[in-house]
Amino acid sequence: MSNDKIQIFVNSIKTFLAPIWPLLEDERVTEVMVNRHDEIWVEIRGKIQKTDAKFKDEDALRSAVNNIAQSVGRRITDEEPRLDARLPNGFRVAAVIPPCSRKGTTVAIRKFATVQFTFKDYINIGAMTADAAQFLDIAIKLGKNVLVSGGTGSGKTTLLSVLSNRIPRGQRLIVIEDSSELKVDYEHVVFFETQMADEQGVGEVSIRDLLKSSLRLRPDRIIVGEVRGSEALELIQAMNTGHKGCMGTIHANSAEDSLVRLEALASGGDATLSEKALRHQIAAAIDIVVQISRYPDGSRRLASISEVLGFTPDHSYNVLPIYEIPRLIKQPDGRLKGEICPTGILPSFMGEIEDNAIPFPRAKFNKPNAA
């Protein structure tokens, strides 16, 4: 969409969102959460705080939500009481209306950084070390399949954007999202976005549909913004059939949990596939799991970078941390001190690193001495 059209949209929506527009314009605010028309919260630097802002009444808030839905070609009605949409200016809007939302119309508007993040930015804010960033860079260059795991608001999408921009040039990328949020600056890239069904209930295009189509469009790498349904099976099978370097995000609280969740999602994709076959496909498909977390001090950091190596003797996924945060110490100002460190475990593809003459020696994986 052109800048002029975006500005026209902003001007039209500004009237309806007038009570919270100053919050949306505040660069410190990353998310605005409307629990009901007179209860509005914001997230600033990872911390949530209540504001004095309020809509006139429930009708005013409902009108604002209806206007947003219409402006992006979606709808929110008693029959479809949920809205999940990306606005032309990049904001992500989620809304639920009564009676599903008992307190009244509930809205969350998430803002995304207008400036593309880089590994250097992560290093500067202490979210990862230079060595951890270089290791991820190596994994991307060697075509490892990467799963970015984390909770809501932990920064999975931002990290996936950074990883995607480290893919070596000369490849064909296909990016598939429910609502376009990834910032991928790449020469040869195709972006797909899902489509809701129309009022007659036809025309829906899911992530799974787009993933199936993408496999026929000669992708070198497939990037799925968020894996949250049966499309997980198609992604796993793509990873196992020669599409190296695929990536995606998933909601999970640990690297181990991310694989269990991926298994649960994929199990709905093909009733004829046995549990044993599915688990072996997952173990073979995923090479690296990057866990990103939001901590009590509001910071977002890489909690671990792990490699998936088959199964343990008790038949659980064998997930070995290559890097992890051993401990975080609370400082007098409330901030947490600590950084992600090597665990002493060598990645199984150390030979590939050496064969490609990548300057990342084995000593880089030595576990640091305890302080």
Image (cartoon, grey):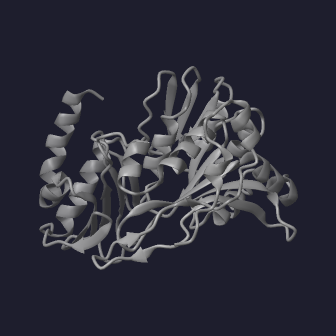
Say whether residue 66 is left or right of residue 224: left
Residue 42 shows up from this direction: yes
Residue at 40% over, 70% down? 337
The quarter in which the N terminus is drawn is top left
Residue at 67% over, 30% down? 357
Q: Quadrant of residue 41?
A: bottom left
**25 and 68: which one is in front?**
25
Say whether residue 188 is left or right of residue 310: left
In this rendering, is residue 228 above or below 5? below
In this rendering, is residue 114 above or below 35? above
**197 and 225: which one is in front?**
225
Say whether residue 15 is left or right of residue 214: left
Residue at 80% over, 57% down? 279
Spot occupied by residue 316 in the image (x, y as percentages of width and height): 79, 67
In this rendering, is residue 361 above or below 228? above
Spot occupied by residue 183 in the image (x, y as percentages of width and height): 41, 38
Spot occupied by residue 211 in the image (x, y as percentages of width and height): 63, 37
Q: Quadrant of residue 29?
A: bottom left
Q: How many marks?
A: 0
**77 and 249: which one is in front?**
249
Residue 210 shows up from this direction: no
Q: Quadrant of residue 114?
A: top left
Spot occupied by residue 307 in the image (x, y as percentages of width and height): 69, 54
